[in-house]
Image (cartoon, rainbow, N blue to C red):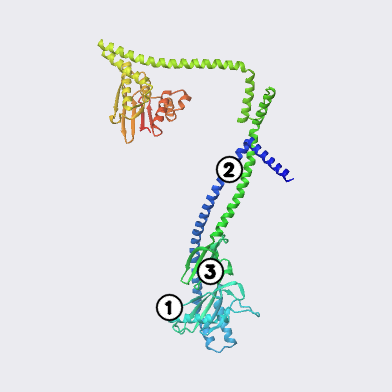
Amino acid sequence: MEGVVEKKEICGIKKVRDYCKSHMWCSFAMAILVAIILLMTIMWVYMKNQYYTHLVETTYTTEEALMNSVRINMKNQMETYINLGSGLSINEETVDAIQDFVTGDVDAQTNKDMSNALKSAARSSTFIVGIAVASEEGIIYQYDKNEMRIAGSRPIWEEDSEEMIKEVFSEIKEKNGKNEIPRYKIITHPMIHPNMESLGMIHIAFPLKNLNSYQNVEYMMLVSFQTQPLTSFLRQMNQNQEEYIQAYIEDSEGEIMLHTQGREYMGIRSSDYQKENQLTGLTAQIGNYGWTLHAVIDEEMLMKKVDTIYGQMVIIYAGAILIILLILFWTTNRILRPVNIISNSIKRVEDSETREQIAIEGTNEVWQLAQEYNNMLQKIRKAAQDVEEQHDKVIESLKMKQRAEREALESQINAHFICNMLNAINYEAMESGNFKVSILLKKLSNILRYTFDQKHQNVYMFQEISWIEQYLFLQRERLDNAFSYEIDFDSDYDNWPCRKLMLQPFVENSIVHGFEGMENGGNIKITGKGYKEFLEIIIEDNGQGIAEKRKTVIQEILDDPMLAKKREVGIGISNVITRMRMHYGEKMKVEFWTEEGKGTRFVFILPMPE
């Protein structure tokens, strides 16, 4: 039974393999899948590390700014408490009530007076929880705003605090005897109200003057304040980030007195807390109270948060890949449907010699292929005559090619023949003494040789200027001196590279169009001067100028030479501008000016060709 199951599994795997081999979309899907997974892995690792680094840096930067703000707010709040307590410790009514209580007989009335005095003092601020008076023997009297008049209620200062109270009094007395500042002392225990677990407390001991002097202090006032304002400031440190950022205050004894997570860590030593939880963070001192503000960051938890976010991204990526594969399967099958139809039609042709047409259902490239297949079937029906006709066309094409090659060769032979004949005629003219004709023939021969030379299309500027000079000479003679010309070219730039015959169309434009209808007085001036890494060439005339309509067309052709073919004008200028831009690159500039009745000017700024 197991063998049959195993055989079916092998058979199923083979079918899947064969299906993948015979369907193009599987190869596409595999390639896309591998590419996406590779890209996703690279981006996942890179972005995860980058995001973690950014998150850590941002967290530390934010916490540092928050810590500075919270530190200042806490310091201001403590100064408020100290000012309140200092004011109460020197309040005459309160001090007198205390003196009457400790020096007089203790009875119901003195107790009531003492209670009223402390109650009145405590009402000066909603943050005051209670006030107590103590001496070197311990607590003398204490008032608690939240004292519960029921059995089992406990005072703020209990018997187990007596020794600590005596030590604080002794320290206050010694400090004030030496006139040390500050005169007060901050006490952080007890941290929680004995009857209200939600009420945190902090205590400040103030000396009471003895005959307007602090030299021999006999009593001190213990003012207990709420820590709720300090806790509110502290919780700003981990607002919206409670999972990996915590903040706490370490008192002068190295114990945690306030924590953003409440009472859980209060009383624990700060060093033990950070070591146990493997935390890192920032610290800042709060005033001169011996307190240290800590912002601790659990980087391991931070990394877990990043892992959680990117783990969710992996699920999203996996879903996206699945959707892509489904779309690819549907799209590929739809695209390849005409291919399958063509394949089945070809098989029918092979089997039964039938040549039925395929019904075209679309216009995309693959259906166009199906249409081509239909066209092919039609052509097969007349294969014999088509082959013969094609054979005749090939032969005729070969004949035309041979004829074109022969004509090109003859043209080259004719060019040499013309130049040689002109030289022979030149010698005859010289022998007969007709030197003017000789000069004209010589210059014409030079022009033709320069023009017919197909091997050298890239020349130097001195060659181009020399050709232009001979061209202008012949044109002037042909037009019976209707114009004159000037050429002023800086010889330092004779070897500047250029394209052959690149200036001729612009010179010809001046002669043919600029001087049209003029019998004399025309002038063409060609100037060439260099500056830095550029050569400036100016071709200008004093002819008729160019009409506004034709001027616009020429300017457009100078900007975009391809427009010449569309407008069927300026072909010569278009060709030469195209050749010049190919030679000099995009740094080349052409400026054009013309005005009817005043002339035309072309300015070329030519860089050294790359």
Q: Earlier in the sequence, mark 2 or mark 3?
A: 2
Q: Do we see residue 322 in this rendering? A: yes
Q: Earlier in the sequence, mark 2 or mark 1?
A: 2
Determine contact: label 2, label 1, CB under 8 Å. Answer: no
Displayed quadrant of residue 106: bottom right
Image position of 417 (left or right of 394): left
- Which residue type carries mark 3? Asp
In this rendered view, identify the residue nearer to me: 287 or 279: 279
Image position of 528 (left or right of 6): left
In this rendered view, identify the residue nearer to me: 246 or 144: 246
- Which residue type carries mark 2? Val
Mark 2 = which residue? 34
In the image, residue 32 sits, relative to residue 404, either above or below, namely: below
Q: Residue at x 63, y 25 (%)?
A: 373
Q: Earlier in the sequence, mark 3 or mark 1?
A: 1
In percent of width and height, residue 518 lies at 34, 19
Q: Quadrant of the C terminus?
A: top left
Mark 3 = which residue? 272
